[in-house]
Image (tube, rainbow, N blue to C red):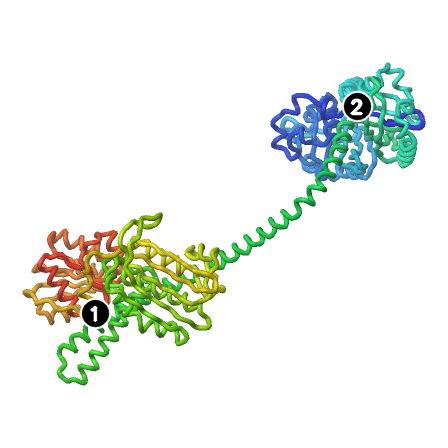
Amino acid sequence: MASDPPPSNPAAPPAASGLTGEWMDAPEWAASALGPPGGWPPDLKAVAGLVMGSNIPMLVAWGPDLRVVHNESYGDLLGDRRPAQGKPFAEIWADQWDVVGVTVERVLSGETVYEEAVPRLLHRHGRAETAWLTFSSSPLRDESGAICGLFGVVTAVSSDARTERRLRESEERFRLIADSAPALMWVTKLDRKRSFVNRAYVDFLGITYEQAVDFDWRTVLHPDDQARVVRESIAGEASLQAFTLEARYRRHDGAWRWVRSISQPRWGPGGEHAGFIGVAIDITDAKEAEAALRDVNETLERRVEERTADLRAALDRLRQEIAERERAEEALRQAQKMEAVGQLTGGIAHDFNNLLTPVIGGLEMLVSRLDDPKLKRLASGALESSRRGAKLTGQLLTFSRMQRISIAPVAVNRVLDNLRPILRHTLGSRVAVELRPCPQAAHALCDENQLENAILNLAINARDAMPEGGTLVIGVELRTEPAGPDLNDGDYVCLTVADTGIGMTPEVAARAAEPFFSTKPFGKGTGLGLAQVYGIARQSGGTMRIDSREGHGTTVRLLLPRADTAADAAQAEDGPAEAAEPGAAARILIVDDDGDVRQFLGDLLEEMGHSVTLFESPEKALAGDLFPRPDLALLDFAMPGMNGAQLARALRERHPDLPVVFVTGYAESDQIEHNLGSDVPVLRKPFGFNELSNLVRDALSGAPAAETA
């Protein structure tokens, strides 16, 4: 506080404790950039309280963006520029910033600017008007002495006789608002005599206004602070810049209070130095909190040392999680690549089935008609190769998940024996393979193609676990299992795949069947192999169990429900089915967009003695002459425009009891079931003479037809 030399700086209680008013609770603050007043710095609260309680147009522009807090009088002055609370000063006066900005730059450089009767263009009530403003703008500084904003007081001046009266009213309003402010305020002249002090100033000292104007603050300044405060006060006044003092002063009740005062020079109309204006706040609570914080910091330093190890551990865990996430992302990319490969493979296999259909059928006819032993042997070899190709396409369709799963009794020992050549070529010469069948474990309920895939998956995993070679044992046995969390009690066929490889740790073994989990290098595996094997076992009503020890190999057991019947025993060999005795000649309608398949079907059926009508599209079939009524319709399912199911419905509108057989590839299985159910007769490509003959005979006789594969 400025007073008789040397100057001193007491202050009032903190603004935060005394700053009240309805304006603090106004909802507009929460939506403004400044936020609710409860979170403002103490210095801003102190000056804002002065502004909001005044009837004189006053404002505070705070922070790097000079966000504005103004009272209602200044709001009336702004007129149509409102709402302005919390907005940048430059945004509010954007249309006049070329002149207003000059004043702001002067203030932010540390100068207190006073200007009288300056014309300003105002916008009020929807129209523009010019007003002559007299205003004073002063820099605001924070506790470090840095300029953090500006404080402005404005009076509108006109040229009529009311101007003087308005000025006197403004001075009176200023005195009233200053007296209502919780912060200590004062104004000094060049001789250091105070020309004004407010009510908080007088109340802190507990004396009269007249005594407070001439009071010597050195008499209530703490002895330990006197030398420093006098020195800093003299230097601050000499700099003609705003300066801040912090010291302890004895309040009228004898209590020592920490006070922070901010003093800045004021200037006359001509720019001459006219004295100082100051404001002070009580920061005792903040000082005590600072001391408490120091104690807390000392405690925290000790606790930080104790927690360093925990933080390091947490950091290690975070790094592991990041690495795991990177592995998962790479696994996902690999899975997406494999999904694309599967889709491509499925499409190729499906088209290849269409190509094999006339090849197999034609070779069957040749084999049955050739008498030359050499030619018959060559044709038989070609037919057998074609059937192996058909089996390969079935495996490709299974890999691409386009093959429909069919749960049925499967001869596990036969499957194992059929895989012997594939295993020998796949695993290489460094892996010795032992197959141990079990006659008692004859049949298991599962999908045969899926079981083959599972065995091959497990064998390849075992090979990769034996980089230097080893022994792979694949055995079958019959086991009785108790009920468990993933298994019902009963008899199960146990397929065991055991290797002598590197084995797995308990942690790896516990996660081995998780999708995307793999211990192989990126690009060497998808992490889906064991997950697929586990899924095959679970779909069949069984489960998979893994027993592994690091350095001692791995044993994987597939438990599949034992079948009570051996329905597939008659097909233990892959040879062709017995041909049915041909029935009476029938009129058969064939609709297929593949010319080779369509002609092949027609030739085979004519060979059987039937009358055939061929159409290349559903539209032509519906538009063609179907008289007399056909006895049977063979329809391709996947055709452009109208599919086989739609064509079948259209034909049955004309002939309600017309038997229909669908000729299709594996890719359309789900669509056929969705449209027509799972019991519709289906002839799956590729097929031979006998399969076609049997299905046509059953369809014409009205007997339930089994799906061919």
Horizontal relation, residue 212 to residue 593: left or right = right
Residue at the image point whose x is 68% and y is 26% from the top: 75
Name the residue nearer the viewer: 372 or 652.
372
The quarter in which the C terminus is drawn is: bottom left
Residue 319 placed where, x, y %? 58, 54
| Tag 1 secondary structure | loop
The quarter in which the N terminus is drawn is: top right
Q: Nearer the viewer, mark 1 or mark 2?
A: 1
Q: Residues within 10 Å of mark 1 (few under 14, many from 20)?
A: few
Instruction: Report which residue position mark 2 lands on.
Output: 12
Residue at the image point whose x is 19% and y is 64% from the top: 569
Q: Is residue 52 above or below residue 572?
A: above
Horizontal relation, residue 199 to residue 453: left or right = right
Q: Residues within 10 Å of mark 2 (few under 14, many from 20)?
A: many
Residue 23 placed where, x, y %? 66, 23
Q: Quadrant of residue 197?
A: top right
Q: Residue furthest left?
A: 584
Mark 1 and mark 2 lie on one chain; the one further toward the N terminus is 2
Q: Quadrant of residue 304?
A: top right
Name the residue nearer the viewer: 496 or 42.
496
Q: Amino acid at mark 2?
A: Ala
Q: Is residue 608 above or below residue 183?
A: below
Is residue 86 among what the camera can see? yes
Is residue 160 among what the camera can see? no
Q: Amino acid at mark 1?
A: Glu
Instruction: Report which residue position mark 1 lands on.
Output: 573
Horizontal relation, residue 228 to residue 700: left or right = right
Name the residue nearer the viewer: 380 or 506.
506
Residue 126 placed where, x, y %? 63, 28
Compute the Cα span from label 1 to label 2: 105 Å
| Tag 2 secondary structure | loop
